[in-house]
Image: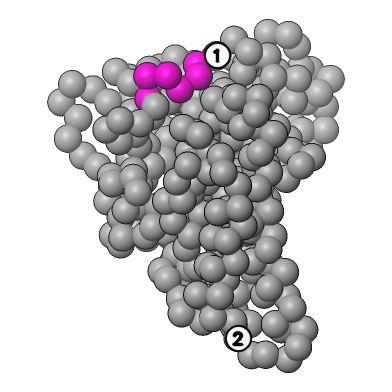
């Protein structure tokens, strides 16, 4: 990392971050930077919370220049999902990024990202067969496509994502490796509220009563962790995935406001394929459920 970052805060002004609504604008900035300058990139869909901001802080700490994107990507929303009501608050988001010291914000609209003749998509094979993929058909094609486009446009040194979206993290690592992208994927721990609820833009949809009950989601995952740890503490070599799934389901079912359990998945850390037994290599325990009408996802890594 160059010494440029040492005085960046001294030079930082209220005029930053600079907002770029077009590909040409953000590309002109990227091309103006010397190859030795490291670029940290934080892709978001806006409605920023502490989870997003923690990624931006990490990028600010580790890179010379920080670019964030704010784009509600229509291709990763399925029929009947919340594309139209997804919160859009660009001015508030930019203000939050300004406080951290983000240099540039790429904020295109859908017409900029997907022209009228757009016909090319990135299809990560196998991920539509994961539990999350089955629940949201075509979602990961949309994620892979927009992330590929953003990486091509911004050409970052490091890109930052949160572990909360477990399958998405594996998809992004996969496309970066398979398509020989010159970017390091940095996955950061899930940021949680004090009561354990994973931070999410969709938490804003919860009523006051639903928000009070929402910690049950993380409690169910902690129950799986406790079971996993206790079995290994007794000297067992592995844990049945069904046992982990059962304990998560039981905790979720104890809360009457959980209106639907979409899935509880026990998957391999590297490819998100289901496993029958969990040994020293660990696993990801992930779930999706509805609290009232709000869909919540969360996961824990066991190892």
Colouring: one colour
Find numbered disc 1 in the image and state the secondary structure of the residue it sits on: loop
Whole-angstrom CA distance, mark 2 to mark 1, is: 47 Å
Q: Residue at x 27, y 26 (%)?
A: 114
Point out residue 222 in the picture as x, y percentages from the top left corner.
69, 60
Could one spot residue 164 in this view of the protein? Answer: no
Mark 2 vs 1, N-terminal side? 1
Q: Is residue 68 magenta?
A: no
Residue at the disc numbered 2: 238
Point out residue 270 in the picture as x, y percentages from the top left corner.
49, 68
Q: Is residue 300 above or below residue 109?
A: below
Q: Quadrant of residue 55?
A: top right
- Which quarter shows the C terminus? bottom right
Q: Nearer the viewer, residue 269 or 246?
A: 246
Q: Is residue 37 above or below residue 32?
A: below
Residue at the disc numbered 1: 89
Q: Nearer the viewer, residue 112 or 165?
A: 165
Q: Residue at x 42, y 51 (%)?
A: 262
The 10 Å Cα crowd at callout 1, few under 14, some 14 to 19, many 20 or more, is few
Q: Residue at x 68, y 63 (%)?
A: 223
Asked whether, in this view, residue 117 is left or right of residue 136, the answer is left
Could one spot residue 189 in this view of the protein? Answer: yes
Q: Is residue 240 above or below residue 257?
A: below
Q: For the residues carrying marks 2 and 1, which lies nearer the camera in this image?
A: 2
Tell me the chief SS of the magenta region: loop
Q: Residue at x 66, y 24 (%)?
A: 208
Q: Which residues are magenta?
A: 83-89
């Amino acid at each position: 990392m160059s010494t440029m970052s040492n005085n960046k805060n001294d030079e930082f002004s209220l005029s930053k971050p600079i907002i770029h609504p077009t590909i040409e604008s953000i590309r002109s900035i990227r091309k103006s930077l010397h190859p030795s300058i490291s670029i940290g990139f934080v892709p978001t869909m806006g409605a920023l919370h502490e989870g997003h901001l923690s990624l931006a802080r990490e990028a600010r700490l580790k890179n010379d220049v920080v670019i964030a994107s704010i784009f509600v990507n229509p291709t990763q929303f399925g029929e009947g999902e919340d594309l139209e009501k997804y919160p859009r608050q660009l001015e508030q988001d930019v203000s939050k990024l300004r406080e951290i010291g983000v240099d540039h914000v790429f904020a295109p609209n859908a017409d900029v990202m997907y022209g009228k003749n757009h016909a090319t998509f990135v299809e990560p094979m196998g991920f539509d067969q994961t539990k999350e993929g089955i629940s949201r058909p075509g979602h990961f094609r949309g994620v892979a496509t927009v992330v590929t486009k953003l990486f091509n446009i911004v050409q970052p040194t490091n890109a930052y994502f949160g572990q909360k979206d477990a399958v998405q993290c594996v998809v992004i690592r996969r496309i970066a490796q398979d398509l020989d992208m010159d970017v390091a994927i940095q996955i950061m721990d899930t940021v949680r509220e004090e009561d354990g609820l994973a931070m999410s833009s969709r938490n804003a949809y919860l009523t006051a009563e639903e928000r009070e009950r929402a910690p049950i989601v993380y409690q169910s995952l902690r129950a799986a962790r406790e079971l996993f740890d206790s079995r290994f503490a007794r000297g067992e070599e592995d844990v049945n995935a069904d046992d982990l799934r059962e304990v998560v389901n039981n905790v979720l079912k104890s809360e009457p406001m959980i209106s639907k359990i979409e899935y509880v998945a026990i998957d391999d850390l590297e490819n998100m394929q289901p496993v029958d037994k969990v040994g020293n290599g660990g696993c990801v325990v992930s779930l999706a459920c509805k609290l009232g009408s709000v869909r919540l996802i969360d996961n824990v890594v066991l190892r």
